[in-house]
Image: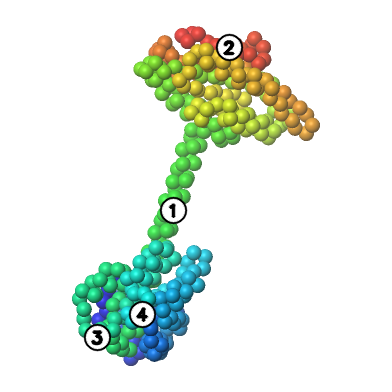
Amino acid sequence: MTIIDAKQFEHPFGVPHIQQGDPLVGSTVDVLLHSKIIIAGAKESDVAFMKTMLQISGFTTILSAHSGEGVMDHLRHGIQDELCDVDLVILDSNLTDINAQSLRSIMDRFDEWRLIPIISLTQESRWDHAQALTDLGHGVTTLLYNPLTAESFPPSVMTALAVKKERDKTYQEQQQLKDEVASLKMMEARLQFSVEHDDLTGLSNRRKLEQALDISLIQARNFGVNGVLLYVDLDRFKVLNDAEGHVVGDSLLVQISNTFRGFFSPQDTLVRIGSDEFAILIDNIDGSQAIKKAEELRFMLDGYSFEHMGNQYHLSASIGVKLISSDSNKLMAGDILAHANQACYTAKKRGCHQHCKTDPLAP
């Protein structure tokens, strides 16, 4: 926020003289001269006088208003695609229905308006320090006193527009930075997800399962919270995959995965181990509940059918059950997974759509 001393400008029509090192260049000045400006005052003659001074200085797009509502109409109509094309508001203190402080308060509520600077014109011809602090403290970019002259008024407008241009540039850079950070976070999240999840089904992968098993073993050893690992092998999946192709087989695996999501709790860890092998880790469950859950899962998969191009396929599954309890203190996550896999293999050897429970300490 600045208070402009008109003596630093020496242009016959009030356009600021560009000194060496000044950030404004010819193209920038041309852009600023085409900025959209709202001039608001209660007296039409005052508004016309200010408008004429700016037009003589080269400003091309100037709107007039004689009330606070007129100012708000111009601001509202200036919004296009969540941006406002108004670059500056010049507000005379003789308006009775709005002042610079209240207008700033309104504009600061909306992203489309909060970067637009305000020049406040006071009818007092002498310096009022308290009023200056009040206005500048409420976001007024420039404070001018009457009488206005061609040597002071247009340069002040040019400076305020330069402030707006700089604000827009900073805002765009901030938004670009936010977008880049959001993009990086999204890439990081996707990478993290791919590290711990199966690409096809979106279920957890073996790495994630081993991490979850480590936690389950700690809970069982230290807090007596039992768990179970179900190892599921889809029977006759290879028949469908060979007959219909991998694309159809993948479609079935995705459907089965979604079925698992509906059957198990969100707190359970659902894992795709291999081509047609899945694992489900359930915490806080005892042995009888685990066997019942495995039986319910087997029954559900026994009734599962899949149709493609008029061919009907009926599925079933072999399930290995490995309990995780305080007796598992000598086992590691890999041991639990190996025992569940062995139990599943035993169930498959006994015949399709079976389940088999391992002894908690079985090698």
The residue tagged 4 is: 95
Can residue 74 be seen here? The reply is yes
Q: Quadrant of residue 138?
A: bottom left
The residue tagged 2 is: 356
Amino acid type at image mark 2: Cys
Considering depth in this image, is 300 or 279 the residue closer to the camera? 300
Q: Relative to residue 355, is residue 166 depicted above or below?
A: below
Q: Where is residue 165 in the image (x, y as percent from the top left)?
A: 39, 71
Q: Position of residue 252 (x, y in %)?
A: 66, 31
Q: Count how many numbered circles sit on residues in the image.
A: 4
Mark closer to the observer (2, 3): 3
Of callouts 3 and 4, which one flags the residue occurring earlier in the amino acid sequence? 4
Disc 3 on helix, strand or loop? loop
Q: Do the residues labelled 2 and 3 touch (CB within 8 Å)?
A: no
Give the residue drawn at x 46%, y 38%: 192
Q: Relative to residue 44, is residue 160 depicted above or below?
A: above
The CA distance from mark 4 to mark 1 is 44 Å
Disc 4 on helix, strand or loop? loop
State which quarter of the image contains the N terminus: bottom left
The CA distance from mark 2 to mark 1 is 52 Å
The residue tagged 1 is: 180
The residue tagged 3 is: 125
The CA distance from mark 1 to mark 3 is 50 Å
Mark closer to the observer (4, 1): 4
